Amino acid sequence: MTIAFWIFAILLAVTLTGGLFRTAIGPTQSDRLSAAMLLGTNGTALMLLLSYLTDAPALVDAALVLVLLAAIATAAFVRYGSAVGVSEDRESDDA
Amino acid sequence: MIVTFFDAVVVVSLISLAWRSITVVRLQVSIVTFLPYGLLMALAWARLGAPDVAIAEAAIGGGLTSALLLVAARRVQRAAKSTRGDSRPTAGRRVTRRRRTTAALGAITVAVALMATLWVLPADSGGLRPMVEANLEASGVGNPVTAVLLNFRAYDTMLEIAVLVLALIGVGILRTSDSAIAKEHAGRSTGLGDTMFGSLVRLFLPVIVVTAGYLLWRGADDPGGAFQAGAVLAGGGVIAVLAQISQPQWLTDSLVRFAAAIGLIVFVGVGVLVVPFGYAFLEYPRDWSKVLILVIEMAATVTVASILLILFTWTLGRGKAATERGDPS
Amino acid sequence: MLDVLSVVAAVFGVGFFTAGTVGLLRFPDLYCRLHAITKADTLGLGFIALAVALQSQSPWVALKALLTWVVAMAAGAIGCNLMAQRALSSRTTVEEGTPK
């Protein structure tokens, strides 16, 4: 049972690493931020699994806090990210 | 064995993220690469058996740092653009080969020294836990972390809050307002309407406020506490600022400054208050421990939230020192 | 019995997360990628939250896990909408998002 959950945790950690690739590659800034969004959710799932695996129910609180504040990054980017319309975040230094 | 594999994935990701966010040239890329770092750190803390820190890191590293960095990057870009005509951030002094090798050698030395120290430490020494557990009864709370932070080592925590206030003052002295952002704000409608940001505020702020209160209350006996609650509350405030809610009438400048100071005031106040009764500074009377700790925690939550929120608003470059707090009225 | 349910739910959860990540990496376009990650948000996290909720000691912890799922869905929906709006307003055209 625990072993199974550890395997799931590892698989989720691997998908997390996969998402990191998009932050590396993503041609536009929006791609990178959308990858960051997925990473937030992925991390939340991992946190939930860890709450069971390390026998710490408080980590569910940590997961809750994570999702509550995950939207902030997206909101900040949409509001105050690199100026929209200025050679919109292609491989240029503006982005 | 399997557990080690999991740890390995997390550690490798952490290191490569750290490396990449430093070595990447473009500012925006390096910032977005850094954003998951806070998340991974929260997972690392969880794995290390420190749920209190995991909650705090989730709040600060997962949300607040992201917003702060993204906003700061924009101002850096704009500043660079206005001075140089393009928006590449300036490189500063030339980084010569000599400086680079010196820095590398210094960093490697410190890293090796740290690793050697860790290697030599006894594996399962238990640390201070036995001592804390022995005195937990007398501390007035059930959570050992809260007991240490707000009772056994309350003096340190008080000084930490003082450092926060000092940092706020320092930033306040150095900040400049960003006229472009001020103009942007002036032109925008401040009603929530049915925009996406409106939905964000309406859905999230109530839950955030309740969660903060919950964390504060649970801090007494379970992982949680003032800092976590304050950070979550600050996150709510950041959402309100991002949604550009008009500032409520009752939120004056002086009220905000008072909120930033109240944690320290109450902390020192409590410490001084017990002295006439024959106790030392910050030595809580046994029966009053729990109440005093709760009072201090409530004030500390307000202070931490205010300071973090003010710092964010100042980074944004808003001209006024005032901020949005908690729920819009 | 509860264990079996948890494992099955977790399998589905991990499956959806994998699908979402693969979509994030392989889809040609920002809009398609946003579509992929919302699937991971809702279904992936939902199943994982269910798995953890089934295993939790107290009903309150289970409720908190499910609350996490609900909040994640809200955050995901709002976030993706915001991102898409921004991309649209900056005239990021469909299909041109990837370098070869």
Image (spheres, helix red, strand yellow):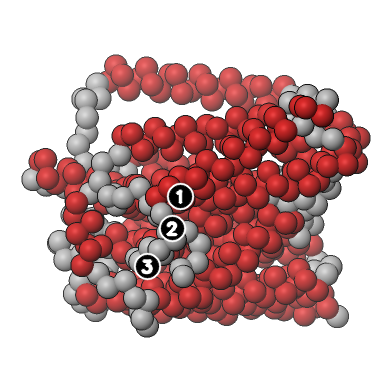
**Amino acid type, residue under disc 2 in the picture:** Leu
The crowding category of the residue bearing disc 3, from other C-alpha atoms within 10 Å (few below 14, some 14 to 19, many at least 20), is many
> Residue at 70% of width from left, 29% of height from top?
B272
Visible in this render: residue B105? Answer: yes
Q: Whole-percent x and y of residue B236?
A: 50, 61
Image side of residue B45 versus residue B321, left or right: right
Asked if A26 appears above or below B312 in the picture, the reply is: below
**Amino acid type, residue under disc 3 in the picture:** Ile
Same chain for mark 1 and mark 3? The answer is yes
Element type at mark 3? loop
Q: Which mark is residue B272?
A: none
Query: Mark 1 belongs to which subunit?
Result: B
Residue matched to label 1: B256
Query: Mark 2 belongs to which subunit?
Result: B
How far is disc 1 from disc 3 in space, using C-alphas?
Answer: 16 Å
Q: Which mark is residue B245?
A: 3
Q: Which mark is residue B251?
A: 2
Say whether marks 2 and 1 touch (CB < 8 Å).
yes
The crowding category of the residue bearing disc 1, from other C-alpha atoms within 10 Å (few below 14, some 14 to 19, many at least 20), is many
Image side of residue B223 versus residue B41, left or right: right
Q: Which of labels 1 and 3 is toward the front? A: 1
Upstream in sequence: badge 1 or badge 3: 3
Upstream in sequence: badge 2 or badge 1: 2
Asked if B269 appears above or below C79 in the picture, the reply is: above
Q: Which of labels 3 and 2 is toward the front? A: 2
Q: Whole-percent x and y of residue B214?
A: 69, 61
> Residue at 38% of width from left, 44% of height from top?
B21
**Amino acid type, residue under disc 1 in the picture:** Val
